[in-house]
């Protein structure tokens, strides 16, 4: 489940660059870019059967880590992950990966 969630998140992070390419192609054939983006967003927002990427990532519980530093790669498969991020867990609230949104918390053994 987490792997599918990460795949969905990674796809959502790729969309802005894909949209730019699509916008350039759409402009070349005479379709206003604002209409395409606005219509796509409105259509996506009407479908309440699908959850947004933020809703999906918030369903994943914080990952407990033994040490003070978590290393997040996004996925066990390097082709689906993101650059490694080392996250400091000194604070009490969960720390969030800036790439995929996974949350990490230090597991205290007291």
Image (spheres, grey):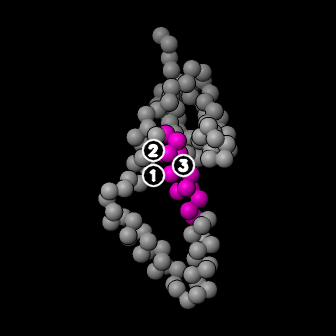
Residue marked by disc 3: 7
**First in residue order: circle 3 vs circle 1:** 3
Q: Between tags 3 and 1, which lies in front?
A: 3
Give the mark nearest the N terminus, 2 or 3: 3
Residue 55 place in picture, x, y as percent: 40, 48
- Distance from Cα at disc 2 to Cα at disc 1: 6 Å
Residue at 48 percent across and 27 percent down: it is 92
Q: CB of mark 2 within 8 Å of CB of mark 1?
A: yes
Q: Secondary structure at mark 2?
A: helix
Q: To which residue does mark 2 refer?
A: 57
Give yes or no for contact between labels 2 and 3 (Cβ–Cβ under 8 Å): no
Where residue 18 appears, x then y in whole percent? 60, 67
Q: Which residues are magenta?
A: 2-16
- Residue 10, magenta (yes or no): yes
User: Image height check: is 103 above or below 106?
Assistant: below
Out of 50 and 106, give the one closest to the viewer. Answer: 50
Name the residue beneath numbered marker 1: 53
Residue 14 within the segment the image draws in magenta: yes
Q: Is residue 28 left or right of residue 32?
A: right
Above or below, comparing residue 37 to residue 92 in the picture: below
> Above or below — where is 9 with respect to 33?
above
């Amino acid at each position: 489940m987490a792997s599918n969630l990460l795949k969905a998140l990674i796809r959502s992070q790729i969309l802005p660059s894909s949209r730019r390419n699509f916008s350039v192609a759409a402009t070349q054939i005479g379709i206003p870019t604002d209409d395409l983006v606005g219509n796509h967003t409105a259509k996506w927002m009407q479908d309440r059967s699908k959850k947004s990427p933020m809703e999906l990532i918030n369903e994943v519980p914080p990952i407990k880590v033994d040490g003070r530093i978590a290393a997040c790669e996004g996925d066990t498969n390097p082709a689906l992950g993101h650059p490694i991020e080392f996250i400091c867990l000194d604070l009490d609230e969960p720390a969030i990966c800036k790439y995929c949104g996974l949350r990490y918390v230090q597991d205290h053994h007291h």
